[in-house]
Every structure is written in C-alpha cells, then in structure tokens.
Amino acid sequence: MKILVINAGSSSCKYQLIDMGDKTVLCSGLAERIGLEKGKLTHKIMPDSDKEQKIVRDEYFPTHVEAMELVISLLIDPKIGVIKDKKEINGIGHRVLHGGEEITQPVLVDKRVRQVIKDNFLLGPLHNPANLMGIEVCEKLFPGVPNVAVFDTEFGVAGLPPEAYIYALPYAMYTELHVRRYGFHGTSHKFIARKTAEFLKKPQNELRSITMHLGNGSSMTCVKDGKCYDTSMGLTPLEGLVMGTRCGSIDPAIVPFMEEKMKYTPAEADAVMNKQSGLFGICGMTDMRDVHAAAENGDEKAGLAVKMLVRSIRKTLGAYVFLLDGNLDSIVFTAGIGENDAIVRSMVCKDLKGMGIELDEKENAERKPGARVISTPNSRIKVLIIPTNEELEIAEATVKVLGL
C-alpha cells in the first residue's frame, strides 16, 4: 500500500511517497519557486538510506500542475522510478493549515471539505489557498485516487477546553469572526503524544505530558489524558515562543504603536512580526548552529537571542506543569532544535530538580537516533527526545480514513 503525502505552498510543493507496509519512504522531494522564472525540483530516492539518490532539475514551472507532472514522471521513470504506474498510489494525504472549528478529524476530501478550506482562507491566507490548490492539482493528475485532508489545527480544536481557546475579547468576536486559539503543529503534537504513550508503555488516554516542537517555527502543547489541554500558538502561528523569524507573544499594544509611530500599515506590521523578528530580529540569524557559534565568539546579541528563546520555553513549561498540577509523565523535545540542540535542552532543564526534572548531561550531549530518555534515573519526570514525523502521521491518518 502506497500513500503520497503532499504539503503544497503558494510557490512550492513538498512530497513523500511512503510504502505503508514497512513505513519506508520510497522517495521525497521539494518543488520550489513555482510560477517564478527559475524553478527547481529536488527529488530524493530512498532518502535517509545508504541507497539514496538525489536528482535536481532546474526548470520553469508555470503552475503546480507542471511541477507535479515532473514528479510523476520521476516516480514512474523506467530507470529510477519507485513505482511502475501512478495507479499504484492508493491514496493522497494533504497537510492543510486551517480547518476552523468545522473539522476536527482527518477527512476524505469532498465538496463540503473544499468549502471549509475556502471558508478559512481569512484565517490562513498564505496556506489554505495553496493547500486547496494542491488538492485540486492531485484530483486532476491522479483521477480516481482518493484525497484526504489532515488539518494542522485538528489536535488543538478537538481537545482544548473553552477557557483555553477563548480570548478575553468581546465574546462576539468569537461567535461572529471565530477569533479563538486554534493551535498549530497539531500533526506533530498528535504524533508525539501517541509515540510518547507507546514509549512509556501506557494508554494514550492516561498520558500527561508536555511536547516542545522546537524549530524555525516553535510551539508547545500541554497534553492531558492524551488530548491537547493547552497550546502556545493561537489564532495564527505567531503567538507563543520566540521563533526563527516570529516574535512570539508580545504586548498587543505594540502593533498600534508601530502603526502610529513608524507609519506601518497593518500588513507591514504583520510582516515585521512574522518575518523580521524572533532570533533574526535580535541577532540577524535563524540557524541555531550559527547563533551558538556567534555567541561562543562573543556576539552579545546572539547570546541574548539564545537566552530569550530559552526563557520563553521555560516560562511556558512552568505554566503547563502548573496546569497539570505537577502530575505529569514526561517532557518531550522534538523537531529540528528539540532533537538536535543539546545546548538549548540543557538550558531549558537547568536547575529544575525542584520540579522533578533532572537532566543527564552526558546522555543529553550524545547524538543518537530514535526515541530515548535523557533524564537521570532520579528524575521524577522523564525527559525524552522523540523524533517527529508529520508525513508519516498524515499517511497513517489517510490509511485510517480510507479504511485500507
């Protein structure tokens, strides 16, 4: 059984073809600069294995259709293809940013689902139109193959209680404009919640954990009884932690202040907060390897950026431990920074013995594959690293929806 996973952006398309028999990624790739003068497709066959092949094509892709046609030709190429015919693909799973409150589970795409995605263009103006376009392209190029939409907001919308998702604004803003906390990175947080329960050998409906998805975009989720009980991102992915280029939570009055004093339009203010802030805004870098190197060489702004990132994580961690009455199984690091940055993990867990968290610094410093414990045997709360796999989560959801 083979599932194609699609994550379509406005000018890009990421994909993976997964053999669900043994969960092997047969190929993966990224088409970028779609619609621009110089497009590029990077296609990897058997990625993350000793048999990996990498193919790069520089071509002009007027639309996503042309990009996906090239992908299909590579999939079925007589010499390098991983399948003989595109009909071997049993289903297509799509990552969709925003499903509003209408959809709280992965669903088979039909007329109603397409309309829900359209209805939420306002809440996901950059992603939802592109996600819908990806679905429409696949419907055209893979006739008869069912498409499944997996929403990034699903885990938060399905689990958050009203006191967590309603903002203290006039209530009509919620009822009329659907202004509320939705939460994002839901596919990752849901995957990690399941994998954490499996790792700890306990039923997921008994899991009490805190997941830290730390990357260029970062979020944290408080998991109570296996469900999302609170999460750091809000109406949009801007709220919460300090991120690569996003400011995270700030005083909302800063926005009209910028508009008045700096003559920014709302769109310009939004761009500053989403694209020019965070680590980049403080030290001009977003890759934590560069930030750490600069800090070690005496760059004070780089050192400040690291401290700000860690402080935002620790503040949220403390709040979530409190929400769980201190009664939790684990805290979990995942995603690019969470899985690979031993310095950040060490700084986050420093001096938390009073909370029941004690890091094994030697184990933390090691680079090892797979899920593992990096806390000491004396740590009441286990500290874990569990690699996330959003594509596999989407593929597994697709299989479940289709009943395959």
Image (cartoon, rainbow, N blue to C red):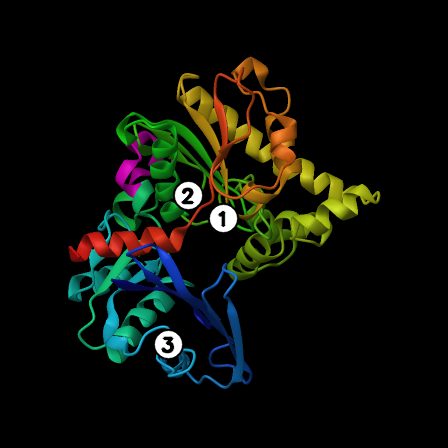
Considering the numbered disc 3 on the image, is that residue within a helix, a strand or a loop?
helix
Residue, x 84% and y 42% (percent of image)? 298
Residue 280 place in picture, x, y as percent: 66, 52
Side of 369 where 73 appears, left or right? left
Q: State left or right for residue 258 relative to residue 157.
A: right
Mark 1 — residue? 238
Q: Quadrant of the C terminus?
A: bottom left
Callout 3–callout 1 Cβ contact below 8 Å: no
Say which label, 3 or 1, has the lower sequence index. Answer: 3
In front here: 245 or 364? 364
Q: Amino acid at mark 2?
A: Gly
User: In the image, what residue type sits under mark 1?
Assistant: Leu
Real-space Cα separation, disc 2 to disc 1, in angstroms? 7 Å
- The 10 Å Cα crowd at callout 1, few under 14, some 14 to 19, many 20 or more, is many
Residue closest to the far right: 298
Is residue 163 shown above or below 324? below
Q: Residues within 10 Å of mark 2 (few under 14, many from 20)?
A: many
* Residue at the disc numbered 3: 75
Magenta range: 157-172
Crowdedness near tag 3: few (<14), some (14–19) or many (≥20) residues, C-alpha within 10 Å: many
Q: Mark 3 belongs to which amino acid?
A: Leu
Judge by depth and name the residue closer to the eye, 235 or 39: 39
Above or below, 403 against 321 in this view is below
Spot occupied by residue 270 in the image (x, y as percentages of width and height): 53, 56
- Residue 216 location, x and y as percent? 56, 51
**CB within 8 Å, label 2 to label 1:** yes
Quadrant of res 112: bottom left
Q: State the residue at coordinates (30%, 38%).
A: 171
**Is residue 132 shown left or right of residue 127?**
left
- Disc on the earlier residue, 3 or 2: 3
